[in-house]
Amino acid sequence: MRVGQNADWTVPEATERVILGRAQRAAPCPVIKAPQFMSFLSAEPTPFDLHFRMFGVDVRVHPFFWLFMALLGWNGDNLQYTFIWVMCGFLSILAHELGHALTSRYFGQPSDITLYAFGGYATAYPFHGTWRNVAVVAAGPLVSFTTGGLAYLAMLGLFQFPQWLPEDEQVVGNILYFLFCLQFQGIGWGLLNSIPIYPLDGGQITRYLFVRFRPWDGVSLSLKLSLLLAIIFGVLAFQRQDTMWGLFMLSFAMNNWQELQMVRG
Ligand SMILES: [Zn+2]
């Protein structure tokens, strides 16, 4: 679908090219985008992919999704906890992407979901105007905050009414850890994706809004904001000696810089 053809604004050709590039790739809703230096961890299909369909949406799970989740929540002392973390990652990221995909379907466009090494994405095709696009992108973090909030409430409920818990201490530990992981990951994915750094959800919403109100330079302004934030978060991450997040932010900054050159070009 061509962006700009039906849109109610006139976008400069360079701007249109940038938006079109995203649209044709049809994968603009990553939870975390694979940095270029880790392209070997891309979402290319493999014979080991898990396929299923949910609420009319096709879902594909790349084998590296499980591996990455296990590394992120590894607990050498308790492998059950590692397993619970991975299952919560699967549920919370799937719920986030279903938020995008089902909203897109509600507005009449097909969508499918891929979960891979760095999270997941729902394919999305742009809609006419601004607000439907914003709704599709915002639905992901909203679902994340909701699942995290519900898990938090369930945990509070169990602390309030411990008689509802089974007697087996190990089972109690697993239930509480399950709720903790759902809460932590729901709020965590929601917050991370709300940062206005492109192509995270927050960055996409910022771009749609900037283009809505400043069609002549909205893309370039949103990219400059995104670049600035990626640099700030990157510096903060490296200061905290958090190399992984530092590299992610560096990669976002580089992508944003390249896109900015395309818009200017
Ligand atoms: Zn998202």
Image: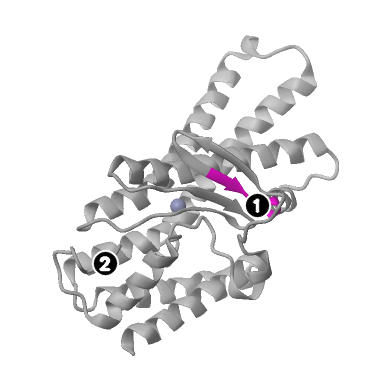
Q: CA distance from mark 2 to mark 1?
A: 30 Å
The local crowd at label 2, few if under 14, some if 14 to 19, many if 20 or more residues have their Cα within 10 Å, is some
> Which x, y percent locates residue 222?
32, 72
Is residue 158 left or right of 175 when viewed as pictured?
left
Q: Secondary structure at mark 2?
A: loop
The local crowd at label 1, few if under 14, some if 14 to 19, many if 20 or more residues have their Cα within 10 Å, is many
Q: Quadrant of residue 185?
A: top right
Q: Residue 48: in sight, yes or no? A: yes
Query: In the figure, 164 relative to 227: above or below?
Result: above
Q: Secondary structure at mark 1?
A: loop
Please name the amino acid that badge 2 sits on: Val
Q: Residue 241: in sight, yes or no? A: no
Q: Quadrant of residue 242?
A: bottom right
Location of mark 1 (residue): 62
> Which x, y percent locates residue 206?
32, 63
Location of mark 2 (residue): 3
- Specify which label sits upstream in the sequence, 2 or 1: 2
Please name the amino acid that badge 1 sits on: His
Which residue shows up at 59% across the image and 70% down it? 35
Which residue shows up at 25% across the image and 50% down it? 132
> Which x, y percent locates residue 258?
45, 83
Is residue 24 left or right of 246 when viewed as pictured?
left
Q: Work out whether residue 264 or residue 18 is closer to the camera in this orientation and state it.
A: 18
Q: Is residue 179 magenta?
A: no
Q: Residue furthest right?
A: 77
- Boundaries of the magenta span: 59-64
> Which x, y percent locates residue 173?
73, 26
Is residue 5 left or right of 149 when viewed as pictured?
left
Q: Work out whether residue 250 or residue 159 is closer to the camera in this orientation and state it.
A: 250
Q: Work out whether residue 143 or residue 155 is closer to the camera in this orientation and state it.
A: 143
Is residue 205 left or right of 174 when viewed as pictured?
left
